[in-house]
Image (cartoon, rainbow, N blue to C red):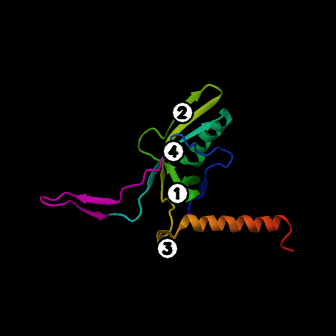
């Protein structure tokens, strides 16, 4: 990643509530006078939208607001943040989706909490490589993963019991 700014580690990550992955559309579609419409790939990489929701204490919200203003430059710069995807929690390059006039919305809650909702734009989401996808399509991946987990558990049990001496 080429970002220099990071989402603060001491702030909570987005919650599952409201979290979604909205891939960008890199396809151009042309309607034809007769026959099926034609489609072609315009871009090999498109930003994805990820609606997010945070739950902050008053102190965390104060820190978030200051970080947004000074470090995230009002949401205009890319920053690193761990986000959930198909292959797990991976650090992504994200920024707040600009141009809407409302980079985030805050709702104070009883119990001394602030709910912050926003739309992040993710430069490129991480997915399986083409090679791993091909392997997964040809093999019993559930069986392979179960075998790896069993082997890992066995090795860890040996290491914990002093079996590596």
Give the percent coordinates (x, y) of residue 9. Answer: 67, 49
Above or below, 67 against 146 in this view is above
Residue topped by disc 3: 131
Measure the C-alpha gap from mark 1 to mark 4.
13 Å
Residue topped by disc 2: 106
Task: Specify the quadrant that holds the N terminus.
Answer: bottom right
* Category of crowding for the residue at label 4, using alpha-carbon neighbours closer than 10 angstroms: few (below 14), some (14–19), many (at least 20): some
Say which of marks 3 and 2 sits in front. Answer: 3
Q: Is residue 77 visible?
A: no
Above or below, 72 against 142 in this view is above
Measure the C-alpha gap from mark 4 to mark 2.
16 Å
| Magenta residues (range) | 19-41
Whichever of callouts 3 and 4 sits on the residue coming sooner in the sequence is 4
Give the percent coordinates (x, y) of residue 148. Answer: 65, 68
Mark 4 residue element: loop
Residue topped by disc 4: 19
Mark 3 residue element: helix
Say which of marks 4 and 2 sits in front. Answer: 4
The question of residue 56 being in magenta is answered with no
Measure the C-alpha gap from mark 2 to mark 1.
29 Å
Q: How many numbered marks, from 0 up?
A: 4
* Category of crowding for the residue at label 2, using alpha-carbon neighbours closer than 10 angstroms: few (below 14), some (14–19), many (at least 20): some
Residue closest to the eye, 89 or 56: 89
Whichever of callouts 2 and 1 sits on the residue coming sooner in the sequence is 1
Above or below, 56 against 111 in this view is below
Say which of marks 2 and 1 sits in front. Answer: 1
Whichever of callouts 1 and 4 sits on the residue coming sooner in the sequence is 4
Circles 2 and 1 in contact, beta carbons < 8 Å = no
Give the percent coordinates (x, y) of residue 39. Answer: 26, 62
Main SS, magenta region, reads loop
């Amino acid at each position: 990643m080429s970002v220099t700014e990071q989402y603060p580690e001491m702030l909570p990550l987005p919650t599952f509530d409201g979290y979604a992955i909205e891939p960008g559309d890199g396809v151009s579609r042309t309607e034809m006078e007769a026959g099926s419409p034609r489609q072609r790939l315009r871009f090999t990489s498109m930003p994805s939208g990820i609606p997010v929701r945070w739950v902050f204490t008053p102190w965390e919200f104060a820190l978030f607001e200051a970080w947004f203003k000074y470090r995230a430059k009002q949401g205009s710069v890319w920053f690193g943040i761990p986000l959930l995807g198909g292959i797990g929690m991976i650090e992504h390059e994200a920024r707040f989706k600009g141009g809407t006039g409302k980079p985030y919305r805050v709702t104070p809650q009883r119990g001394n909490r602030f709910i912050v909702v926003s739309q992040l734009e993710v430069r490129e989401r991480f997915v399986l490589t083409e090679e791993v996808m091909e392997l997964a399509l040809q093999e019993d991946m559930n069986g392979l993963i179960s075998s790896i987990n069993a082997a890992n558990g066995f090795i860890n049990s040996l290491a914990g019991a002093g079996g590596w001496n």
